[in-house]
Amino acid sequence: MILFPAIDIKNGKCVRLTQGDYNKEKIYNDSPVEVAADWEKQQAAYLHIVDLDGAKTGVSINKASIEAISKQASIPIQLGGGIRSMSVIQEYITAGVDRVIIGTAAINDKAFLREAVDAYGSKVAVSIDARNGYVATNGWTSTSTVKAIDLVKELESLGVETIVYTDILKDGMLQGPNFKELQEINEATTMNVIASGGISSPADVEKLKSLDLYCAIIGKALYDGTMNFKDLLDGEENAG
């Protein structure tokens, strides 16, 4: 299972939100570019970047930082937040982003999602952010009437290969992921499932591995020092 360190960018800074609340942010570094370089030095195999401003408004004010990370990094990058047009996808892929993650637009604009998947295939993933089993949109500020499990089945039928599943109520709380929902999602699809939200201990990582998930994204626990990334990688190597 691949471990992705998360880099959430808001107003040009590396931050973490609690339960997706834009009023509950903690700034960890003024330079996301420096943070990305540090994760690469720590042997991360892949980076997960979220443009929080783009996720909320659909307009990115962090493009320069994201492009700088992409330019300097020698490891793959996946990016989510405000990916709502073919032109934005093209811009980021041209800039070196390896996979873009569509969130809100996957709910609101199926024609766009189909076009993106048809054009870019495995370079397009979909983020399913759920609150009490229902999909949330617009940077987690709205909850739809769409059940997450129903969206999963629809996405697979559209040819999506990878999804990122986040339980918002677990995100940033350091209380562990929603293992039950992750297991249900993973068993309901053949798509690659990336777990996100609430991962707070090596035991959480081990349990996610036992569910045969493709990847896990870790954020707050790494930044707060609850977990050590090198130790987690050493655990992966010993397990392998």
Image (tube, grey):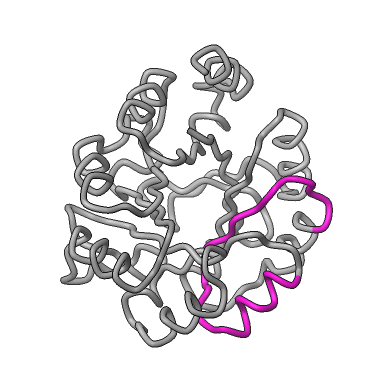
Residue farthest to the right, as pictured: 72
Residue 18 percent across, percent down from the top left:
40, 45
The span shown in magenta is 71-94
Indicate whether 38 appears above or below 149: above
Residue farthest to the top, as pictured: 238
Horizontal side of residue 35 vs 138, given as left or right: right
Horizontal side of residue 159 vs 12, given as left or right: left
Give the residue drawn at x 55%, y 57%. 50
Give the residue drawn at x 38%, y 42%. 197
Q: Nearer the viewer, residue 123 or 29?
A: 123
Horizontal side of residue 36 vs 203, given as left or right: right
Residue 188 percent across, percent down from the top left:
21, 51
Which quarter of the picture shows residue 11?
A: bottom right
Q: Nearer the viewer, residue 33 or 141?
A: 33
Residue 41 percent across, percent down from the top left:
77, 31
The number of callouts visible is 0
Give the residue drawn at x 68%, y 59%. 12
Residue 2 lies in the magenta-colored region: no
Horizontal side of residue 220 vs 97, given as left or right: left
Give the residue drawn at x 63%, y 20%. 230
Residue 130 percent across, percent down from the top left:
27, 56
Residue 81 lies in the magenta-colored region: yes
Indicate whether 121 appears above or below 182: below
Indicate whether 198 appears above or below 14: above
Which quarter of the picture shows residue 173?
A: top left
